[in-house]
Amino acid sequence: MHIENFKIFSDLVETESFSRAAKLNGITQSAVSQQLRAMEKFFSILIVDRSQKQFRLTREGQKLYESAREILYLYDKLNSELQEMKKVISGTIHISTVYSIGLHELPPYVKAFLSKYPDVNIRVEYRRANNVYEDILTNSIELGLVAYPQKHKQLEFLPFHDDVLILVVSPEHQLADKKEVTLEEIAAQKFIGFEPDIPTRKATDKIFREANIEMEPVMEFDNVETVKRAVEINAGIAILPQTTVTREETQGLLKVINFKDKVYKRPLALIHRKGRVLTPAMKKLINLLTSKDLNSLEKAAD
């Protein structure tokens, strides 16, 4: 019985899906089924209760899963400790995040990290917020970056930093010359928002609700880049994270307006699954991402 067998079995249990387990391990769905049958034959037990419509382990299968997790943990821990002993900072780190963070918040950190640790490969996947949590919970991704973090008993949350929400309008919009606005001043404007399940949309809905303002979007999109394009053509106004519109503001494509007497913060957090063994490279990256001073990135990576 090889360590790969326990990894595939563990992924199958945690995803409750033969196809998902196959994808995580780069094999076919049929190969996952064959691995399961091979384990049942090896241990002379029934692992999955096939009389149930939903995926369910037998009592022996549950015991095997718990032991498999312990074996995988010890294996990963050993690997990590050996790398630390050899002072090796290498490997691949997979990060799952939303567009607004991955395109506008993360790049300077990745650039600083790779300049110091060129043997590390960082892969960033852009996902909807709910998929980021799912990626971490199923161990298909090592690290996640989310806005408005939602607590979960199986996840570890580390503060990244707070962004600020601002009003964004086209240079041709009637509000374009203003430095500040109140929520009441934008109540009658056409509003472009994110789709309802996106955390920043939920936050803006709460802002309007607390101000007793009804604001129904005329357009809804699932990513910040599309929202910005709609605002650029003056299809409406939007509330966006300030860091996501720096380039457009500099190029004169969008006008940024602050809210009067109020600052709306957008908390960002780094997440990973509790109990996950962190490689030396992951520890260095987490240390960098959770450092407070962006101007001291190289120092923070040490």
Image: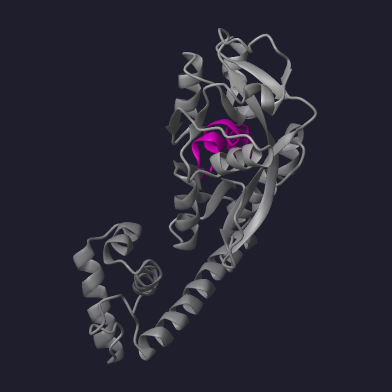
Q: Where does the image place residue 63, in percent across and percent down from the top left? A: 43, 87
Task: Give the tally of numbered discs.
Answer: 0
For the N terminus, which image quadrant?
bottom left
Q: Where does the image place residue 161, in percent across and percent down from the top left? A: 70, 42
Q: Main secondary structure of the magenta part?
A: helix
Residue 212: in sight, yes or no? yes
Q: Which residue of the protein is positioned furthest toward the bottom in this rendering? A: 44
Q: How is the image coloured?
A: one colour
Q: Where does the image place residue 122, in percent across and percent down from the top left? A: 50, 43
Query: Where, by quadrant of the figure, is residue 278 drawn?
Result: bottom right
Q: Where does the image place residue 72, in percent across and percent down from the top left? A: 47, 73
Out of 2 and 65, give the one closest to the viewer: 65
Residue at left offset 50%, top offset 15%: 232
Query: Where, by quadrant of the figure, is residue 254 drawn?
Result: top right
> Residue 212 vs residue 95: left or right?
right
> Residue 93 vs residue 297: left or right?
left
Q: Which residue of the protein is positioned furthest toward the left in this rendering? A: 30
Q: With respect to residue 50, does 73 lie above or below?
A: above
Q: With respect to residue 230, does 194 lie above or below?
A: below
In the image, residue 250 lies in the stretch drawn in magenta: no
Out of 211 and 84, give the one closest to the viewer: 211
Out of 90 and 241, give the one closest to the viewer: 241
Residue at left offset 41%, top offset 69%: 14
For the C terminus, which image quadrant?
top right
Residue 118: in sight, yes or no? no
In the image, residue 99 lies in the stretch drawn in magenta: yes
Residue at left offset 55%, top offset 7%: 172
Query: Where, by quadrant of the figure, is residue 210 drawn?
Result: top right
Highlighted range, magenta: 98-120
Out of 250 and 148, give the one closest to the viewer: 148
